[in-house]
């Protein structure tokens, strides 16, 4: 493969390796392994998932321009698993119908509804551990990477290691009887905490001009959801890097400080940050300096806060381009941000999602979202997964789906999950798909190292969602490198020089 800088990378490919013995969907339930020349059993493994939109994801080959190709160039073993998703389906044959109660021959069966994708990825990790001695790559140093729903999968792989609530599912699949914890997780714009994402979205964006232009019904939904967020964020008992509480009273200011930090980093590197979108600046700068070249060595905390060490505002490491007056740069430092103006700028770059943004299905008012499908059952149903929307939806199907659970799901639903007895199938699925639930669980092995990015104009989920996740991990003593990356939309695998500098540091 010829990668982005013209370098030719030689590797050996091992493809179509099935990671479970009870394969339900042979289109997806296997992984590909790519071993660069010179790799040994001590070489770290870079596990890249291409899940998007909670859809099925075939096992892909490495791409020259993204993190998989870069990982090969850096000498890491690359693993790309396929996973089932909300759209994956098979037609039941006679044998399948015989072994699955209530299924008829010829019936379309959706194979990948929650939590199937994370189960497939856990099975893939167990496969790597099972054959660790037989193949190059160190299964004790697996780094996961994903974007959007794939970022959620990466977050789940990192946050749910060895949690027993997944065991019955994995056993039924024929996954290896091995550990499934990982060393580090890279999460770009993770779409997580779906059971609280609607309230966070309206709390942040409810006062923007576009929300104020909604019809009365949706404007009412927005206000009700926004009112639920303060109690939720307060219940997390989060602490800022300096140890002070992070709560509803200071949360918007904290988001503002994170956006200012990201913009200052970009400004130091030469970006022109306009005052028209809400920023205020110092009157002038002390001089002009060259911005660093991409890839040049620099302390990692300049690019993303190492919240474990409490680095919040990096020192300036260069000047760069900007508005000039009298030969000096104007506005070296950002001093403030009008959040109302800034949020309206974010919304102007891409329209907001509807209300509710995720659990949207309300009969006669809103269509189902992809997330409503994700929590549906094997018949292809779409269901509500939050109390708020279920109560709004007079024809909610939330209760119905528990009748369609398989044996493992029924049995799992009777167990205790984080000290809460769960009896409804959808509640269980939602719990198993939320990495926030596992960070403080003593029965879970959470990854030590985390690289989390969310674009500073990414509106696919609200800023509090990744910020809560990063902060809760930091509060648990994990090594977290977090940034609301300046002016990035919903995207991933960017700033790869920076990412792989971080990986090289943590795997030493």
Image: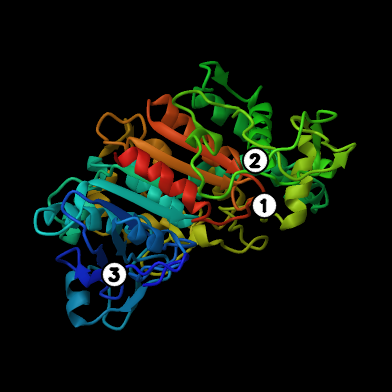
- The span from disc 2 to disc 3 (Cα, nearest Å) is 52 Å
User: Which disc is residue 355 wearing?
Assistant: 1
Pick the front one: 219 or 272: 272
Circles 1, 2 touching at the beta carbon (< 8 Å):
yes
Res. 225 mark: 2
Instruction: Judge from the rendering whether residue 446 lies leftward or rightward of residue 193; answer left or right.
Output: left
Mark toward the viewer: 2 or 3 = 3
Determine whether, in the image, residue 494 is placed left or right of residue 378: right
Helix, strand or loop at label 1? It is loop
Q: Residues within 10 Å of mark 1 (few under 14, many from 20)?
A: many
Q: Residue at x 42, y 62 (%)?
A: 51
Rendered position, 132 above or below 93: above
Q: Residues within 10 Å of mark 3 (few under 14, many from 20)?
A: some
Q: Position of residue 490 (x, y in %)?
A: 59, 55
Answer whether residue 403 is visible to the viewer in this image.
Answer: no
Say which residue appears at 42% left-offset and 65% top-offset.
Answer: 86
Residue underneath mark 3: 10
Q: Along the polypeptide, which appears first: circle 2 or circle 3?
A: 3
Q: Quadrant of the C terminus?
A: top left
Name the residue at 37% across, 44% down: 503
| Distance from Cα at disc 1 to Cα at disc 2 | 9 Å
């Amino acid at each position: 493969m010829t990668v982005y800088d013209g370098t030719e990378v030689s590797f050996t490919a091992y493809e179509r390796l099935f990671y479970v013995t009870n394969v339900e969907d042979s289109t997806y339930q296997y992984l590909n392994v790519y071993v660069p020349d010179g790799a040994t059993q001590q070489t770290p493994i870079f596990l890249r998932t291409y899940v998007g939109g909670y859809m099925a994801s075939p096992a892909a080959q490495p791409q020259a321009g993204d993190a998989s190709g870069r990982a090969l160039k850096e000498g890491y073993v690359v693993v790309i698993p396929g996973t089932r998703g909300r759209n994956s389906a098979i037609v039941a044959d006679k044998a399948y119908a015989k072994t699955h109660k209530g299924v008829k021959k010829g019936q379309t069966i959706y194979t990948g509804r929650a939590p199937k994708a994370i189960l497939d990825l856990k099975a893939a990790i167990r496969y790597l551990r099972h054959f660790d001695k037989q193949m190059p790559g160190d299964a004790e140093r697996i780094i996961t990477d994903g974007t959007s729903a794939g970022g959620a999968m990466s977050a789940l792989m990192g946050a749910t290691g060895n949690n027993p609530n997944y065991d019955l599912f994995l056993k039924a699949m024929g996954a290896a009887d091995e550990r499934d914890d990982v060393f580090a997780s890279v999460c770009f714009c993770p779409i997580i905490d779906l059971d609280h994402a609607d309230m966070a979205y309206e709390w942040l964006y409810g006062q923007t001009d576009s929300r104020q232009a909604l019809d009365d019904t949706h404007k009412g939904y927005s206000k009700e959801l926004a009112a639920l967020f303060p109690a939720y964020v307060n219940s997390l008992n989060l602490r800022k890097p300096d140890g002070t509480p992070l709560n509803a009273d200071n949360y918007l200011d904290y988001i503002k400080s994170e956006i200012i930090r990201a913009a200052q980093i970009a400004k130091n590197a030469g970006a022109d940050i306009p005052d028209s979108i809400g920023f205020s600046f110092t009157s002038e700068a002390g001089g002009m300096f060259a911005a660093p070249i991409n890839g040049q060595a620099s302390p990692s905390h300049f690019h993303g806060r190492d919240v474990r060490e409490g680095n919040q505002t990096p020192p300036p490491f260069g000047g760069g381009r900007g508005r000039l007056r009298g030969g000096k740069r104007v506005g070296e430092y950002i001093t403030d941000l009008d959040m109302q103006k800034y949020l309206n700028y974010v919304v102007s770059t891409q329209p907001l999602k509807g209300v509710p943004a995720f659990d949207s299905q309300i009969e006669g008012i809103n269509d189902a979202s992809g997330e409503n499908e994700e929590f549906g059952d094997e018949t292809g149903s779409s269901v509500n997964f939050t109390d708020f929307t279920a109560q709004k939806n007079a024809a909610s199907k939330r209760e119905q789906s528990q009748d369609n659970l398989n044996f493992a799901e029924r049995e799992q639903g009777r167990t205790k999950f984080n000290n809460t007895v769960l009896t409804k199938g959808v509640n269980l699925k939602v719990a198993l798909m939320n990495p926030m639930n596992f960070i403080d669980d003593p029965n879970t092995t959470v990854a030590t190292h985390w690289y989390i990015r969310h674009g500073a104009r990414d509106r696919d989920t609200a800023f509090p969602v990744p910020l809560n996740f990063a902060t809760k991990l930091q509060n648990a003593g994990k090594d977290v490198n977090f940034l609301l990356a300046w002016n990035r939309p919903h995207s991933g695998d960017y700033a790869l020089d920076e990412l792989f500098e971080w990986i090289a540091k943590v795997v030493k």
